Image (cartoon, helix red, strand yellow):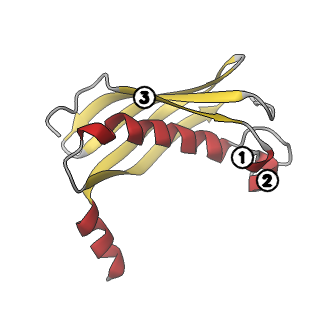
Amino acid sequence: MENLKPGITYTAETIVSEDNSALRLGSGQLAVFATPMMIALMENASLNAVAPYLDEGADTVGTAVNIVHSKATPVGDKVTATAILTGVDGRKLTFDVIAEDSNGEIGIGTHERFIVDVEKFMGKLKK
């Protein structure tokens, strides 16, 4: 974990389909990329950015998102989400995140994750 330093980056991608549309998810009435799916893609980029640097038995969990979804993306277009680690404060990780489609930026914001010991974290849920 000592190798976790600001600047680590990862990009995740998906193709917009009926399955990840606002209409299918119930977050809107139109067949465009759903905001919850954009946020999930941003979270995926964030967790994958730091995963190779975590100690065995550790993982990260999302704890906060502050996102603006500024443009709609139609079915069939590709969306990428890039996460850049900007802060490491103990177990708290902060990321700048941006989503883009073939026409440019569609969303931007920040995301926080916490490093957890998977066994301890899951053990607390069983109580």
Measured in 3D between alpha carbons, the distance from the residue under mark 2 to the one under mark 3, in whole angstroms, is 28 Å
Residue 95, image quadrant: top left
Q: Is residue 124 above or below residue 68?
A: below
- Dividing the image into 4 quarters, which one contains the N terminus? top left
> Where is residue 46 drawn, in percent x and y?
42, 37
Residue 13 makes an appearance in the image? yes
Q: Who's the residue at 34% across and 80% down the image?
A: 126
Q: Is residue 20 above or below residue 120?
A: above
Check disc 3 and give the amino acid type: Tyr
Residue 17, image quadrant: top right
Residue at the farthest left position: 2
Q: Nearer the viewer, residue 5 or 69?
A: 5
Disc 2 crowd, CA 10 A, few/some/many (<14, 14-19, 20+): some
**2 and 1 marks in contact (CB < 8 Å):** yes
Residue placed under numbered mark 1 in the picture: 20
Residue placed under numbered mark 3 in the picture: 10
Disc 3 crowd, CA 10 A, few/some/many (<14, 14-19, 20+): some
Measured in 3D between alpha carbons, the distance from the residue under mark 2 to the one under mark 1, in whole angstroms, is 7 Å
- Left/right placement of residue 17 relative to residue 110 reads right
Of callouts 2 and 3, which one flags the residue occurring earlier in the amino acid sequence? Answer: 3
Q: Nearer the viewer, residue 56 or 20?
A: 56
Q: Is residue 72 above or below residue 30?
A: above
Measured in 3D between alpha carbons, the distance from the residue under mark 3 to the one under mark 1, in whole angstroms, is 21 Å
Q: Who's the residue at 52% across and 37% down the image?
A: 42
> Where is residue 3 drawn, in percent x and y?
17, 32
Residue at the farthest top position: 103
Q: Secondary structure at mark 1?
A: helix
Of callouts 3 and 1, which one flags the residue occurring earlier in the amino acid sequence? Answer: 3
Check disc 2 and give the amino acid type: Arg
Residue placed under numbered mark 2 in the picture: 24
Q: Who's the residue at 77% across and 47% down the image?
A: 22
**2 and 3 marks in contact (CB < 8 Å):** no
